[in-house]
Amino acid sequence: MKIIFMGTPDFSVPVLEALHQAHEIVAVYCQPPRPAGRGKADRPSPVQARAEALGLPVRHPVSLRSEEAIHDFAALGADVAVVVAYGLILPQAILDAPRLGCLNIHASLLPRWRGAAPIHRAIMAGDRETGVCIMQMEAGLDTGPVLMREAVAIGPEETTAELHDRLSNLGARLIVQALSRLPLPAEPQPAEGVTYAAKIDKAEARVDWSRPAEDVDRLIRGLSPFPGAWVQVGGERVKLLRSRVAAGQGAPGQVLHGFTIACGTGAVEITEAQREGKRPMPASEVLRGLILPGVL
């Protein structure tokens, strides 16, 4: 099958690799290189880097709305386009160009968590399960009918980084299965249960210890590793990367013992953190060089 692949970040790379093994990829579309690192030199996206290593042709138009972009896309004569975290809205002319349309790999159990940050939001909301849907794309935001879905449990101490990798690999497996079975029955999404996974705002990342311990724990795990929930210790911002709900009670922000902090109700034990300019470390190592005040 002739496939156009459209994706940009790390999440998309296992999907690209799986499709490359199983089908003919006629072009890879991704976001253009962006300034990154201390030197702010343009850095290709993870998908571009992997596609070039595989010898695949890469395109990164800034828009797909021009007549030229639409013509170039249609001229590829693809059977289907597979879209996973691409980063551009696809106009109807693009959606209609491949023989079998465009299929999206979405990291949630639609219609829950449509939008930009479904993995973060599932953990932050305390969801017990999430999953991957293969969706036939239409003009709305993640509103298309679902061709295939698979659910997975969210671990009690799982972080966004860990769940991200599991769902990426699941998406790679499911899309290969879906393509081998086309055409599949399309299940319209129900009108009930729709939620939107808004893009993560860095303003959400400062820990509010007056919240219940369960909420604080979910925030820490849901924002790990990026942007990272944080607290101010002296003049230093410390990222909290792993945690668990713990026994204990005290004034919100009170350090009970070690790196266990009282919340509005209950307490949270920090198990991994990262000081400014240093690597992530277990909490026990962080505390060797960091003196916590009585109250954070």
Image (spheres, rainbow, N blue to C red):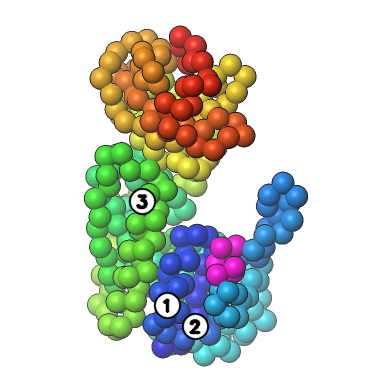
Label 1 crowd (10 A; few <14 / some 14-19 / many >=20)? many
Whether residues under marks 2 and 1 lie with C-beta atoms below 8 angstroms apart, the answer is yes
Residue 19, relative to residue 48: is it above or below? Answer: below
For the point 35% across and 35% down, which residue is it?
218
- First to last magenta residue range: 45-50
Residue 135 shown left or right of residue 235 in the figure: left
Query: Is residue 89 in view?
Result: no
Query: Is residue 175 in view?
Result: yes
Q: Is residue 270 magenta?
A: no
Q: CA distance from mark 2 to mark 3?
A: 27 Å
Three-letter code for the amino acid on which mark 3 is drawn: Leu
Label 3 crowd (10 A; few <14 / some 14-19 / many >=20)? many
Residue 275 shown left or right of residue 60 in the figure: left
Residue 25 circle label: 2
For the point 35% across and 73% down, which residue is it?
175
Return the disc, 2 or 1, that comes first in the chain's sequence.
1
Q: Considering depth in this image, is 133 or 278 the residue closer to the camera?
A: 278
Return the disc, 3 or 1, that comes first in the chain's sequence.
1
Q: Considering depth in this image, is 204 or 253 the residue closer to the camera?
A: 253
Residue underneath mark 1: 19
Q: x, y (%) of residue 132?
A: 32, 61
Residue underneath mark 3: 163
Q: x, y (%) of residue 50?
A: 55, 70
For the point 34% across and 57% down, which residue is it?
166
Q: x, y (%) of residue 85?
A: 48, 62
For the point 51% across and 33% down, which residue is it?
274
- Find numbered disc 2 in the image and state the secondary structure of the residue it sits on: strand
